[in-house]
Amino acid sequence: MTLYEQLLIGLRHLLQRVSSEHWEQQIQSDLEAWRERRDARQHRSKYGGNSTYSDWIISSQNKHTVDDLQSVWANHLRHQMQLALRALSEKPEDERAETKILRSWERRRSAFSRSKPEGTSSRHSASGSDSRLRVVSCHSCGQKQVSVTSLENFVADDLIQGFLYGACVSGDIKALVDRLMDKQQDGVAEARSEVTRAAESAGIVVVEDCGPRTETCAACNSENISVSFWYLTNEGGWTFAPPELERSRADEAQKPAAESVHGSTDRTVTNRLFGLATVVFAFGTMVLVSRYLGRHGFPDATNSIRANWGLLLLIGLPLVVLIGGVLTTVSGVGIRDYASVFARQTLVKRIGVSVASIALAMLAILLASSIGQALR
């Protein structure tokens, strides 16, 4: 059985469990089209726009037989299966496409194993950004709170891909649906407890849901609130940290690297002075070469290897040194750091800097030649 068919069966079973008759019939039709005609175009055509597979949510408000926590897991499960089905519908029997999806699920380990445990190195998810916790901050009393549903969303987002990987490999995707809807899936309660403790250690209060339209501070009932998405970290124990701390740490991490490449202001000035000295030296050398050749002319044996190498050194070497000196003077970057600096620039910028430096060097050659001719 292909992964495409497995996921159609799993999605159909999920829709049966939540009593979504209309969408269950649509998936059943897609499954029959695949089994009878090996046709996946019917399923693929139902994505995008209103009243399509991209436009429905499992919730009690939509008359599905789920509570708030079940709807969280049902929607995360539906979303992941639909993403995979949409990708597989292009080539349902392509083993490479199946392997790519399964590997992406396998690599998405729990945040507790992806985040950096104290004293060990981290191994972040290869499938994208880590899960984030939706935290509401009150600007009136200072309380930080997370709803039960938001906390469950963090757990579901963190675990669902690993669950799907195990179910598809073992061929029991219907059993996974049943375990999640019956709230009997191994690992969920433990992860929920870990996330709750991590939130509480960060001073975040877990509160009951009150609906997005009427969301207020649970402590003072103020509507003067803001929402941010906190990340999981380990500093003497699991906890959550605000996004501004993550940004400041990223800036601190980049600062030494930037300083090692660009250096301090003093180093930049030193580099430019060195570049200017190099330009003066190369320019003076070219003036002397031009004066010498203007007086004595080119060697008679112009076809000899020795003469050609001599001309190359006399003319080519000062030119290369001059171009390097111009680059250093203009950019303030040392010669040793050229590769690391310019590798991060856009192709257009790299070409522009190179062409401008060569053009300045050529103008310097013309000027040196003119001065050399004048001094004959």
Image (cartoon, grey):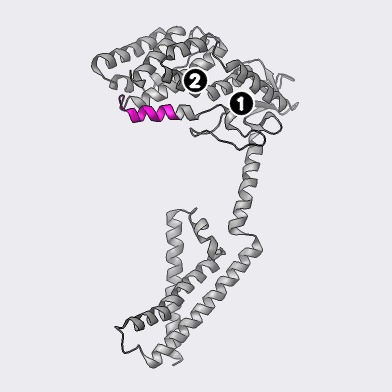
Please indicate whether residue 41 sits to the left or right of residue 59 in the image: left
Check disc 1 and give the amino acid type: Arg
In what quadrant of the picture does the C terminus appear?
A: bottom left
Please indicate whether residue 187 sits to the left or right of residue 42 in the image: right
* Mark 2 lies on residue: 163
Q: Position of residue 161 (x, y in %)?
A: 49, 24
Which numbered mark, 2 or 1, is in the foreground of this view?
2
Check disc 2 and give the amino acid type: Phe
Q: Can the viewer see residue 212?
A: no
Asked which quadrant contains residue 84, the reply is: top left
Q: Position of residue 194 (x, y in %)?
A: 65, 22
Label 1: how many residues lie within 10 Å, few (<14), some (14-19) or many (20+)? Answer: some
Q: Earlier in the sequence, mark 2 or mark 1?
A: 1
Q: Residue 222 or 272: which is nearer the viewer?
A: 272
Please indicate whether residue 96 sits to the left or right of residue 104 in the image: left
> At 66% across and 64% down in the image, what residue appears?
266
Asked which quadrant contains residue 306, the reply is: bottom left
323 over 137 or under it: above or below: below
Specify the farthest residue to the left: 37
| SS under mark 2 | helix
> At 58% across and 21% down in the image, what residue appears?
155
* Mark 1 lies on residue: 134
Q: Can the viewer see residue 34?
A: yes
In what quadrant of the picture does the N terminus appear?
A: top left
Label 2: how many residues lie within 10 Å, few (<14), some (14-19) or many (20+)? Answer: many
Q: Position of residue 3 (x, y in %)?
A: 36, 21
Magenta part of the chain: 90-103
